Image (spheres, grey):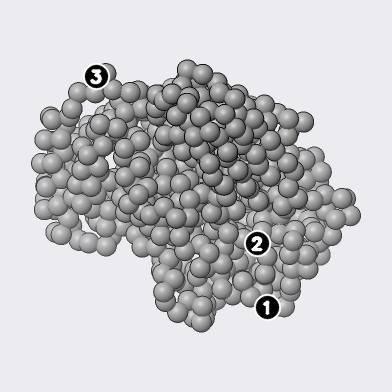
């Protein structure tokens, strides 16, 4: 059924865009097989003068092949929605494409994060295969956390909050899964939450919990500082006592029971508790590394799934205390599992250094529940190398380029370059793709990095400059030089390095003043977009909105650095926030107001102790889901 639905959808998409482009539907036949490899995609395009065929090894590859054909004809999809599409006018007789399309990376996915409406997610899923992505991951069982952030309008007091229920969020997920399956995309689900779910506590976010555990259940959770209680009051962040066979079995059974009742899940993520320095300190648990206990649970999950005849793939997470590879246990059935490498505390101002000694570098020493994690990406590559010796199977990078720092790098150029280099390094570090944990509305301050991500993951030969030139031409058309210069000057003068505490206030101040002068002139000389294609008009409106917001932020930062009065600073800061919040709905599909407010409020409020740049602090802040000003 899914194959037929995807074939029909691919046919309708092909005809829709051919009709827009040429005024005719053409005579292109579509064929799809069924490949035994869940992740392999190959399509062959043979079209001459509007006639021919597109064939593929599976329905998903066929849909990707259709979009690749359209892009070869000059179509571009720079962001979701019709205002994100450029469709050229061509004669059908001019439409000739002959090529074999095999994406460069097997795993090319997007993870739900940030604050979203259900419409945001549905539009993103529609856009994702057009941009080259093949998978989508809904965290937790209902992703309630991310929906509630939008519908309750956390961070924007000008919008009335709307409460949503768990049942409503569940309905949203059902709609989302239908759209994923219509495109035969790979569906990833869950992640964190298992350690609380097996105790009967439904967790769909990082909230505290007042539930009183029975004596029997309390004995199953981790002992930290001599106490068995929820870590910082949060079930989601609480490990179990993994030396207890009952705790391990309850976890394994919870995963298998979920797999039995959710057959649409292609890839099921089994992660332990979130947060760090929260591992059980009892004598029995201290006999093994956390990763050894983890592998024991993974093996039990595999045994139970095999007994039940379930072929679902299981993702295990290399993250926090699990960075240190197992010493005594081994995964017995590697084909069942995918390794997910998540270097959450690394810096995003520099890419992975694949020229260094990371292959021979020993991992940093582990001290239970007393860890401070480094920002040096090389440290994380050393961790990965340890796991690669313990696990020879498939794996991918789970990374956060577009989670926090997209709203610190206002020009969007540095984060895009780092992302590009990291994608090009994947095979060198032994990984087969990339699953991006990020805000969904990552088209502000710049949509360049998100567009680049899809292109770089599918096209292994395109250079950074080629993708950059393609993006500005596709998004801005006749205004491409104006837009490229604007982003470049904002990148240079509104220092990402300052937002990341890498240069001082005295170094940043003259740059900020240059930026103020540049942005003031830019906004006065903004070109008219009358008569331009809708995609170009919308791109320019996003650019104007970004420039206005950056100018407002820089004004506040300059006042603070110059030591102006608290009243003057507060008034400028109020203007900054009101300006964005009043216009949030207009730019809602592109800018995540929850994260924009959270990050920029942090930049302003934390200047006295250094610009707010710590990923660990970021994490605490978004867990709370509130602003700190």
Q: Quadrant of the C terminus?
A: top left
**Marks 2,3: beta carbons within 8 A:** no
Residue 455 vertical placement versus 421 (above, below): above
Residue 150 vertical placement versus 501 (above, below): above
Instruction: Judge left or right: residue 326 versus residue 253.
Output: left
Mark sitting earlier along the chain (2/3): 2
Instruction: Judge left or right: residue 387 versus residue 523.
Output: right
Residue tagged by mark 2? 394
Which of discs 1 and 3 lies nearer the camera? The answer is: 3
Q: Position of residue 354 (x, y in %)?
A: 44, 71
Marks 1/3: CA–CA distance? 65 Å
Q: Is residue 436 visible?
A: no
Residue drawn where x is 15% and y is 59% of the image: 507
Residue tagged by mark 3? 530
Residue drawn where x is 54% and y is 58% of the image: 397
Residue drawn where x is 87% and y is 50% of the image: 309
Q: Position of residue 587 (x, y in %)?
A: 36, 28
């Amino acid at each position: 059924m899914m194959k037929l639905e995807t074939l029909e959808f691919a046919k309708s998409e092909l005809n829709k865009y051919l009709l827009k482009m040429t005024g005719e539907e053409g005579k292109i036949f579509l064929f799809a097989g069924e490949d035994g490899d869940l992740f392999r995609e190959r399509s062959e395009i043979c079209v001459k003068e509007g006639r021919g065929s597109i064939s593929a090894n599976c329905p998903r590859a066929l849909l990707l092949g259709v979009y690749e054909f359209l892009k070869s004809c000059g179509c571009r999809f720079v962001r979701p929605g019709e205002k994100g599409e450029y469709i050229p006018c061509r004669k059908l007789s001019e439409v000739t494409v002959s090529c074999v399309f095999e994406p460069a990376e097997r795993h090319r996915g997007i993870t739900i994060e940030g604050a979203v409406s259900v419409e945001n997610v549905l539009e993103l899923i529609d856009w994702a295969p057009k941009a080259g992505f093949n998978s989508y991951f809904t965290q937790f069982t209902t992703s309630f956390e991310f929906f509630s952030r939008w519908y309750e309008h956390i961070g924007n007091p000008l919008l009335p909050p709307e409460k949503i229920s768990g049942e409503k969020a569940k309905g949203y997920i059902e709609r989302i899964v239908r759209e994923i399956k219509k495109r035969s995309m790979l569906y990833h689900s869950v992640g964190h939450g298992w350690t609380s779910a097996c105790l009967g506590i439904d967790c769909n976010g990082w909230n505290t919990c007042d539930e009183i555990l029975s004596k029997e259940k309390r004995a199953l959770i981790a002992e930290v500082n001599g106490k068995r209680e929820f870590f910082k009051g949060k079930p989601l962040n609480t490990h179990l006592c993994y030396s207890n066979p009952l705790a391990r079995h309850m976890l394994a059974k919870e995963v298998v029971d979920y797999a039995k009742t959710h057959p649409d899940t292609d890839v099921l993520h089994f992660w332990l508790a979130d947060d760090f320095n929260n591992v059980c300190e009892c004598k029995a648990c201290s006999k093994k590394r956390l990763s050894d206990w983890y592998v024991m649970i993974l093996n039990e999950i595999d045994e139970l799934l095999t007994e039940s005849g379930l072929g679902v793939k299981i993702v295990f997470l290399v993250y926090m205390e699990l960075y240190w590879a197992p010493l005594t246990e081994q995964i017995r059935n590697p084909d069942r599992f995918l390794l997910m490498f998540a270097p959450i505390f690394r810096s995003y101002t520099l890419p992975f250094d694949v020229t260094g000694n990371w292959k021979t570098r020993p991992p940093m020493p582990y001290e239970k529940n007393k860890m401070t994690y480094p920002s040096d990406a090389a440290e994380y590559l050393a961790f990965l190398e340890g796991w690669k010796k313990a696990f020879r199977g498939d794996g991918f990078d789970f990374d956060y380029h577009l989670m926090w720092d997209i709203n610190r790098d206002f020009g969007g150029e540095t984060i895009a370059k780092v992302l590009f280099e990291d994608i090009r390094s994947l095979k060198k570090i032994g990984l087969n793709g990339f699953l991006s944990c990020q805000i969904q509305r990552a088209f502000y301050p710049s949509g360049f990095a998100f567009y680049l991500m899809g292109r770089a993951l599918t096209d292994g030969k395109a250079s950074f400059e080629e993708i950059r030139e393609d993006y500005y031409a596709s998004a801005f058309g006749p205004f491409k030089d104006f837009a490229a210069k604007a982003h470049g000057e904002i990148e240079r003068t509104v220092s990402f390095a300052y937002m990341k505490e890498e240069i001082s206030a005295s170094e940043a101040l003259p740059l900020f003043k240059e930026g103020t002068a540049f942005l003031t002139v830019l906004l006065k000389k903004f070109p008219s977009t009358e008569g331009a294609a809708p995609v170009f008009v919308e791109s320019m409106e996003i650019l104007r909105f970004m420039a206005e917001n950056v100018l407002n932020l820089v004004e506040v930062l300059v006042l603070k650095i110059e030591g102006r009065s608290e009243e003057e600073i507060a008034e400028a800061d109020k203007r900054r926030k009101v300006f964005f919040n009043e216009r949030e709905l207009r730019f809602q599909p592109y800018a995540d107001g929850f994260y924009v407010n959270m990050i920029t409020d942090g930049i302003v409020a934390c200047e006295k102790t250094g610009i707010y740049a710590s990923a660990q602090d970021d994490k605490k802040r978004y867990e709370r889901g509130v602003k700190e000003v």
